[in-house]
Image (cartoon, helix red, strand yellow):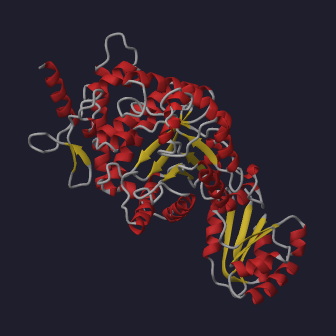
Amino acid sequence: MKTIVAGALGECVHVAGVTNFLRLADQAGWRTVFLGPAVSIDEFLQAAKREKADMIGVSYRLSPDTGTRLLGDFAEAADEMHSTGVRFTFGGTPPVVKRVRSLGFFEKSFDGTELIEEVIAYLKDGKTESNTVQNFPQTTVERIQWKAPYPLIRHHFGLPSFQATLKGVQDIAKAGVVDVISLGIDQDAQENFFHPERQEPRRRGAGGVPVRTARDYWMLYKASRLGNYPLMRTYTGTDDFLQLAEMYVDTINQAWGAIPLFWFNKMDGRGPWDLEGSIREHQNLMSWYGERGIPVELNEPHHWGMRDAPDVIFIVSAYLAAYNARAFGVKDYIAQMMFNSPPGLSDAMDLAKMIALISLVEPLTTDDFHIWRQTRTGLLSYPVDPDAARAHLATSVYLQMALRPHIVHVVGYCEADHAATAADVIESCKLARRSIENAFGAPFMTQGDRVRARSRELAQEAEITIEAIKALAPQGVVDPLTDAGTLAQAVKSGLLDAPQLKNNPYGKGQIITKIDKRGACISIDSQSGESITERTRIESLINQSIR
C-alpha cells in the first residue's frame, strides 16, 4: 500500500481541502497520513522520510505572493527527495495554483474546480491529464468499479431538434459532470425506426430527438467523444427490438439495455404488441443482451408506481423483473429504484419500500448474476417553481444515497416545466453531485424503527403476492414467474394492479390506493376506506372469480 503524507504549509491553517483529498486517497487504496495545519518545511520532509511517503500533498490557501516564495523554498528543500521518485502534489486557491504551476515542481495542482473523477483518475492511475478516453472506462461495470465509492451520474437528454441535441451532447460531455447520457429519442423513432412508411412528419421530435438513420446515432455518439467521454444508451423501442439493439451496440456502444416486462405495448398505448406477446419479446431481448455480456436494466417497478399502485405491487414487480433477467441470461443487472412514486410518499416510507425491494432482489445474486443499484428522483414529483424544484432534486438525491447506489439517475429539476436543455442537464448534475458528496457524511437513515418495521411488513406482503402469481400457472408450467401467459394473467386477474389501469382491456384497474398517515402507499377497501392486507385483497379477487 502506497503512502500519502499531506498537510497545510507554513502559516496556512486551512485544511478542509487536505482532508477531502486524503479521504479520496483512502478510498483509492492509499495509506494516508494527515500532518494538520501550519506545518513547517522541515516537519513536512521529516514526516515524509519517517513514513516512507510515495507522495507528498502540500496545501496553501493564503496570499499568492507569500505562497510563491514559501513554495519555492519548499521545492528547493525537497529537491533531493523529488529526484528519488517521491511524487509531489499541490492544492490551493486558483490564484496560488496559477503561480505554483509556473514553478514546474509539482506533478499535479488542484485549485478546487476539478471534478471528483479527475482526482480519482490521478490517485488511482497516476493520470495527470484527465481529458483522454483512456482515463475513463468505456463499459458500465468497469466505470462503476473505477469510480467507486462514488456513483455514476446518468441523465436523460434529447431535444426536438437534432442539431440542438448534437450540440448539447458536446456541451454535456465537455462539462464532465455526466457519466452516462441516456438519449431521449422521439416516439416515432421508438415505434417506427425501421418502418418509414409508418412515420408521420407531424410527430417529428415529439418526446425527444428525431433520429431516423444509424448515422444519426453515430453522429450523436461521436459528439460525446470529449470531456469525460461519457457512456451512452437509449430506449429499447416498442417494436423490432433485436434490430434496434444491434444498431445501438454498433453506433453508440450501448452501455446497457433498458427493458420493460409488462409495458411499452398495447396496454399503455406505446407499442403494437399485446401484453403476453410483448413479455415474450422482452424476454428474448434480455437473452440477446445477456449473450453479449451487456448489462440490462428492467425499468419496471416505477411504471406501476407512477400509476398509483401500492408499494407492495411496486416491490413485487421489481422482484419479477430481476428474476426474469437472471432466468434469461443477464449477467449484470441494474435494479432501478425510482423514489417519490407516487409523489406523496414520505421519505421514511420511500426508504422502507426500497429496503424491502433490495431484501427480495439481492438474494437472487449468484456468481453469474450481479446486481447494481440505480436510484432516481420521481419523474412526476417535481414542483413547477424552479427554486423549489432545485431543492427537491438536491434533497431527493441526498435521501437516495442512503442506499449507496452504484448509479444515480438524475432527473432534471426543470422536468415539470420543460424538457432539459444541455444547460439544465449540467446544472442539475452539479446539484446532484454536491448532494452526493455531502451524503458521505450522512447519518444512517435506513436504521430507523419506522423504516425497518415498514420494510419488513412490505417484504412479507410481497411474498404473499408472489406465491399467488405462482398459483395462477396452468399445470405443466415449469416456472410460473417466467411464463409469459402466467405473467399476463397476473395483470388481467388483478393480482398485479394499479388504479390507472381502470377500463384497460389487459388489466383490472380495480385496486384502490391512498397515502396513509405514515406516508406509505397502501391498498384500501372500496367500502370502508380502511387499509387491507395483500392476503385479504387476493382472497377478494379469488371470490370474485368464483362468483
The answer to whether 141 is drawn above or below residue 283 in the figure is below
Residue 258 in view of the camera: no
Left or right: 393 with respect to 426?
left
Residue 449: quarter of image: bottom left
Q: Which residue is drawn at 89% across and 66% down?
A: 84
Q: Quarter of the image containing the N terminus?
A: bottom right
Q: Quarter of the image containing the C terminus?
A: top left
Q: Residue at x 44, y 29 (%)?
A: 323
The answer to whether 326 is drawn above or below residue 202 in the figure is above
* Relative image position of residue 143 (x, y in whole percent): 64, 47
Residue 321: quarter of image: top left
* Relative image position of residue 187 (x, y in whole percent): 48, 39
In-front residue for pair 74/323: 323
Residue furthest toward the left? 528
In-front residue for pair 503/395: 503
Residue 263 in view of the camera: yes
Left or right: 495 with respect to 14?
left
